[in-house]
Every structure is written in C-alpha cells, then in structure tokens.
C-alpha cells in the first residue's frame, strides 16, 4: 500500500518549524523546543510529530541547509562571474556556520564526522564546480582541491556568532579567497 500523502497544512507546519528553529538555534544553541513550537505557531505535539527529538530537528536543519548549499553553487555561477559566485557561496556557508556553531557536536555525531554521510561528496562537488569555473576563467589557481577548501571553511563552525561572528567570518573568507586567487606573475 502506498504511503498516505502528507497534508498541505502538515507540510506548511514542518517548514514553519524549520524556519523558526533555524533562526532560534542560530541565536542560541539552547533554544527550547517549546519556544520554537510557540514561535512557529504550532503545539509542542505537532513539533514532536515532525521531529521526535531535538537531535532529529537539528539533523533535518543540517540536511536542508547542506542541500541548499549544494544546489546553490551552479545557480550562482549562472548569475555571476566565478569570483563573485564563490564569495556569495562562501557567505552562505558562513551563515550556515552560525547554526552549526552551537550544535556542531550533534551534527558531527549523527553524520559520522561528516565524512561518511550522503552529503559529503556532493558538497565537495559544489565547491569543485566553483573552483573549476574560477580556474577556467583565470581568477583562481588551477588544481585546487575542494577538500582542502572545505577544511579551510570548517573554521566557520568555530566562530561564535555572539562575538562579532559575521565580521570575523567575512574577514576569514577574504583571507581564504585571497589564498585561492591566481597570483599575477612578477614583472621584471
């Protein structure tokens, strides 16, 4: 027997919970599920029907955000030059890092450290698409390893959003991008 289709209002509730939870957990990793449900305009029972545990909610946010970043890479390249697309994508990764800051241990445990889970290879692919476009255009060094860039970006999960996090992330991303740029040959 095929699964019963999800009601439209149930889908709306789920998306609303995720939207509110993303903002609440980015503001404070200790945000209560009760407060999230209230802000989303649903009862706590509705929240638990969709997400039976705090960890389930966090993991769903993680999956949703990672898939968004994977899908965003080629979209940005279609609309922007490679260096601009790379910076815009990095900025989105930094915003995601604000959520991950307070809940990294839950995500790390649930995704086996991020190495053996379903999003790792596609995420590297998204980075590779941006790096390849920049190398083809000549603005980025050729042969950059997406995994090396991911390791550089992992510092974003360690930036406390409450301590000037956005500005610090912007400065760090500028340093990362400067290191990826093609260095013009010395004149002489």
Image (cartoon, grey):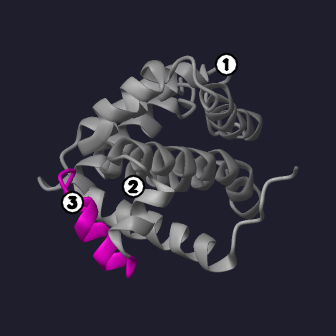
Q: Is residue 129 left or right of residue 50?
A: right
Q: Nearer the viewer, mark 3 or mark 1?
A: 3
Mark number, residue 143: 1
Q: Which residue is mark 3?
A: 32
- Determine whether 12 is above or below 90 in the image: below
Circle nearer the N terminus (3, 2): 3
- Is there CB contact under 8 Å for labels 2 and 1? no
Dot in front, 3 or 2 = 3
Question: In the figure, is residue 120 to the left or right of 2?
Answer: left
Image position, residue 12 (x, y; %): 58, 76
CA gap, disc 2 and disc 1:
27 Å
Q: Nearer the viewer, residue 61 or 141?
A: 61
State which mark lies toward you, 2 or 1: 2
The answer to whether the residue labelled 3 contacts the one labelled 2, judged by CB atoms less than 8 Å apart, is no
Residue position marked by numbered label 2 in the rendering = 95
Find out whether the residues at labels 3 and 1 contact each other: C-beta distance under 8 Å: no
x then y, percent, for residue 167? 24, 56
Q: Is residue 76 magenta?
A: no
Residue furthest front in the image: 1
Which residues make up the magenta segment?
A: 27-42
Q: CA distance from mark 3 to mark 1?
A: 45 Å
């Amino acid at each position: 027997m095929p699964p019963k289709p999800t009601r439209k209002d149930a889908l709306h509730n789920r998306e609303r919970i995720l939207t509110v939870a993303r903002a609440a957990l980015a503001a404070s990793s200790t945000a209560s599920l009760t407060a999230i449900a209230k802000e989303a305009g649903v009862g706590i029972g509705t929240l638990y029907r969709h997400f039976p545990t705090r960890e389930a909610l966090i993991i769903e946010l993680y999956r949703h955000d990672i898939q968004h970043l994977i899908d965003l890479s080629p979209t940005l390249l279609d609309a922007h030059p490679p260096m601009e697309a790379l910076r815009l994508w990095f900025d989105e990764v930094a915003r995601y890092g604000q959520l991950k800051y307070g809940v990294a241990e839950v995500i790390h445990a649930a995704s086996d450290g991020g190495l053996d889970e379903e999003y790792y290879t596609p995420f590297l692919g998204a980075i590779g698409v941006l790096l390849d476009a920049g190398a083809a255009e000549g603005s980025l060094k050729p042969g950059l390893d997406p995994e090396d860039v991911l390791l550089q970006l992992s510092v974003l999960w360690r930036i406390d959003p409450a301590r000037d996090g956005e500005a610090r992330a912007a400065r760090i991303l500028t340093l990362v991008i400067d290191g990826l740029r093609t260095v013009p040959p010395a004149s002489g």
